Amino acid sequence: MAHRLTRRGFLHGAATAGAALSLPRSRAFGANEEIQVAIIGCGTMGSGHAGGFHGLPGARVAAVSDADLERMAAAANGLQPTPQQHQDFRRILDDPGIDAVVIATPNHWHAAMTIMACQAGKHVYVQKPVSHSIWEGRQMVRAARKYDRIVQAGTQHRSDLALVEVGEDIRSGKYGPLQWVHTLVLHTRESIGKVSQPQPVPDSIDYDLWCGPATKTPVMRKSFHYDWHWQWNWGDGETGNWGPHYVDDVRNVLGWDDVPTSVVAAGGRFAWSDDGETPNIHLTLMERQGVPVVVDIRNLPRGGGSTEPAEHLGLVHGNVFMCEGAAVKIQRGGGAAYDHDGNHIKQYRGNGGSHEANFIQAIRSGSRAELKAEIEVGHLSTVMCHMANIAYRVGSQATVDEVRQSMADNEEAARTLSAVVNQLDANQVDVAQFPLTLGPALEFDPKSEQFMGPGAAGANRLLRNVMRKEYAIPEVV
């Protein structure tokens, strides 16, 4: 299938050359006027959004798009009236009748599609992680500002009232000074298997379009869909998959308008000899203005004959905010505060909110200030996940003692490391034979969004990805 290579100067035309573009104008929507939405990416999340947006008052899913014809057709089925179907999403961007797009593609397409949609005058709801690199995330923010678009990040915890209440209590000092935060994602997963040669691309998929900005490499995984999460060319591992939700909760609760300034990470891909590249054990210690944040990602079961996930501090996923007078444990949908004897102090009840409805309402009002997770909010939380991944990827093999020494300034990180080693042992992983990977302690400048000091050169090389010329995000959006 032949593709038009560009629209509105996205690739290497007017925008890159500095020529003036005709900027799209925001328009007001009448109280009874339907907002026409298109879904781009029709996997599990995209299909869920198709139903979610189609059921919202004042919104209708008018089109769907996916590089996989079968997925696209499945998402369209059941929606009435039946939406248009376009394998090439650029036809949606060229349609003046589409007001907004929902991007639920694999990670490597999020930024380029968002920028192209902004240039086309569309508002955007983009799934987490909003970007596949720190640089392209900032380009998304620039595009949203330049074209004055409403761009919502899919970190839907921002619409959960429980997080709002927790933030008010912790920031007011209700439980005393904050000591540290522990972010937990201890979901179990299985090996993705190993292939000995490139796998055929299903006939229903336009592989060149699916690859988009990413390097067009052979398919080296058994399952074409979803398992791209665990290969760096397309995905960002579990840290980029579930991590954005829970580190965003940290920034939300603590009222941060920036990101930590230091990071060190250790981990590895253990127990599985497969085609996955991202770590299934990933322990990161970050710090911002004296507040340590431990980010604890583990995909292995607790081991010792049990296939259940590990627990830490009584949680499998969520955040623990340890204060001088209490521990606040919060996850999707709510949580509670406990004194240090384990006695219940206060319950926090959430309902998940309506993130999709918030997006539609902001479009209708024309005010990005109404968004719960405006693109810069989503970008900064995604930056934290990229920082953790980069800190791991520039690492080398290390002993447990070396990892412990790198995190010696934080007792919770040290306790977590011991829990990780015990879990690996219970999964019959000998860390002497299969060592952890440990990255250098890195300093990060939130203003320039670059690493500084020792180790910065290697880390900064991972601030942006190599992109294919015909789909690459331009330097000037």
Image (cartoon, rainbow, N blue to C red):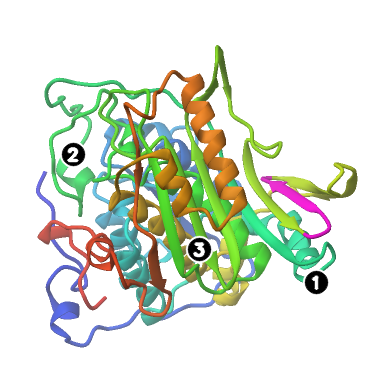
- x and y, in percent, of residue 391 in the image: 36, 55
Indicate the secondary structure of the residue bearing disc 2: loop
Disc 3 versus disc 2: nearer the observer: 3
Residue bearing the label numbered 1: 172
- x and y, in percent, of residue 63 in the image: 39, 49
Residue bearing the label numbered 2: 206
Residue at 83% across, 48% down: 340
| Left or right: 322 as drawn, with respect to 200 | right
Looking at the picture, does residue 124 appear above or below residue 187?
below
Mark 3 residue type: Gln
Mark 1 residue type: Ser
> Distance from label 3 to label 2 (Cα)?
28 Å
Residue bearing the label numbered 3: 152
**The residue stretch that appears in magenta:** 324-332
Residue 325 falls inside the magenta stretch: yes
Looking at the picture, does residue 18 appear above or below residue 185?
below
User: Is tag 1's residue or tag 2's residue first in the polypeptide sequence?
Assistant: 1
Residue at 28% across, 39% down: 231
For the residues labelled 3 and 1, say whether their Cβ atoms are less than 8 Å apart: no
User: Is tag 3's residue or tag 1's residue first in the polypeptide sequence?
Assistant: 3
**Disc 2 residue crowd, few under 14, some 14–19, many 20+, Cα 10 Å:** some
> Distance from label 3 to label 1 (Cα)?
28 Å
Residue at 50% across, 48% down: 243
Q: Quadrant of residue 143?
A: bottom left
Indicate the secondary structure of the residue bearing disc 1: loop
**Disc 1 residue crowd, few under 14, some 14–19, many 20+, Cα 10 Å:** few
For the residues labelled 3 and 2, say whether their Cβ atoms are less than 8 Å apart: no
Indicate the secondary structure of the residue bearing disc 3: strand
Residue 427 falls inside the magenta stretch: no
Visible residue check, residue 82: no
**Toward the viewer: 187 or 298?**
298
